[in-house]
Image (tube, rainbow, N blue to C red):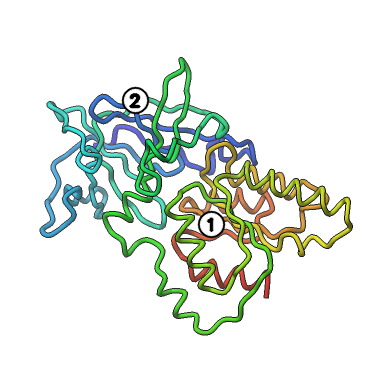
Amino acid sequence: MAIAKKRDPLHTEILLESGTNELEIMEFTIAGGSFGINVAKVTEIMQYQTVKPMPNSHPSVEGVFMPRDVILTVIDLAHYMGLPAAEDNSRDMFIITSFNKMNVAFHVHAVAEIHRISWNDIEKPDSTIYGGEEGLATGIAKVAGNKLITIVDFEKIVVDISPQVGIQMSEITELGHRERSAKPVCLAEDSPLLKKMLLEALTTAGYTNIKAYNNGEEAWNHLEMIRDDIMASGEHLAEKIAVMITDIEMPKMDGHRLTKLIKDDRILRDVPVIIFSSLIDDAMRDKGHRLGASAQLSKPEIGNLVTTLDQFIL
């Protein structure tokens, strides 16, 4: 039985605001630890129920169940994280998610509350402690009362369990022979693993001049320097930056805030902004359009990203 449901994103106050650099985090617990997920990924919360096991599946795939005529795969987060199961699973919950054009249920031990915070209040964890490319924490959020919540990289979990849903280099190969381009491209992506894969894919696709940043704040600092150089030297904007590619979810500054800053700047506003995110749906597409995004693409469609990038550069 569903005990709570996410508000319609089109009528959620936070999604109607443009470039505020804020988000809502749903706090949940596993083995007594506090973790978080962006509410924008959540469609529903359901009480735990027995699921149908699937033979030869990943050890962390608990099975499948079918609420409302939709089959959902259930991932046991405690098992995946190497944490103990709940002694009493009567309070366990399913968090039903939608991202990367997929619907997946995550089995957790309890759902606590929703916190509205700024991306500036989320710190990137130290890679030496949280595993770098192999780590599961995309950020550490500080909420009311100095409580720390670990933001989990759900996309990485799904790709680790089912690699075929991640970025596929075969999509680049299928594009055939390509000319090389040294036009300057900027990339803002907080996931070390995904950033590495994107750089490899774009380089293979012929783009040889890519500057990558860990979040929107770092990318904006670079763009401000470009703006200052242009004002001092009179160089053409396209010689400094041809396209900005940005994720949405990033510590310190998200992609929507970055897009707003670019489009509100009289020097930088002509830079095409491609939003490349797992969160692209009708609501997010509407918000990105109002902020001035030139294109909005859903991860992990790397072939689509390359062909879209071509339109702005070639």
Asked whether, in this view, residue 261 is left or right of residue 99, the answer is right
Q: Quadrant of the C terminus?
A: bottom right
Q: Is residue 29 above or below residue 193?
A: above
Q: Which residue is mark 2?
A: 112
Does label 2 or label 1 sit earlier along the sequence? Answer: 2
- In the rendered structure, which amino acid carries the disc numbered 1? Phe
Q: CA distance from mark 2 to mark 1?
A: 30 Å
- In the rendered structure, which amino acid carries the disc numbered 2? Ala
Residue 256 is at least partly visible in this image: yes
Q: How many numbered discs? A: 2
Residue 276 — which label? 1
In the rendered image, the residue lying farthest to the top is 145
Residue 38 is at least partly visible in this image: no
Q: Quadrant of the N terminus?
A: top left
Asked whether, in this view, residue 218 is left or right of residue 189, the answer is right
**Of marks 2 and 1, the one in the foreground:** 1
Nearer the observer, 153 or 227:
227
In the rendered image, the residue lying farthest to the bottom is 177
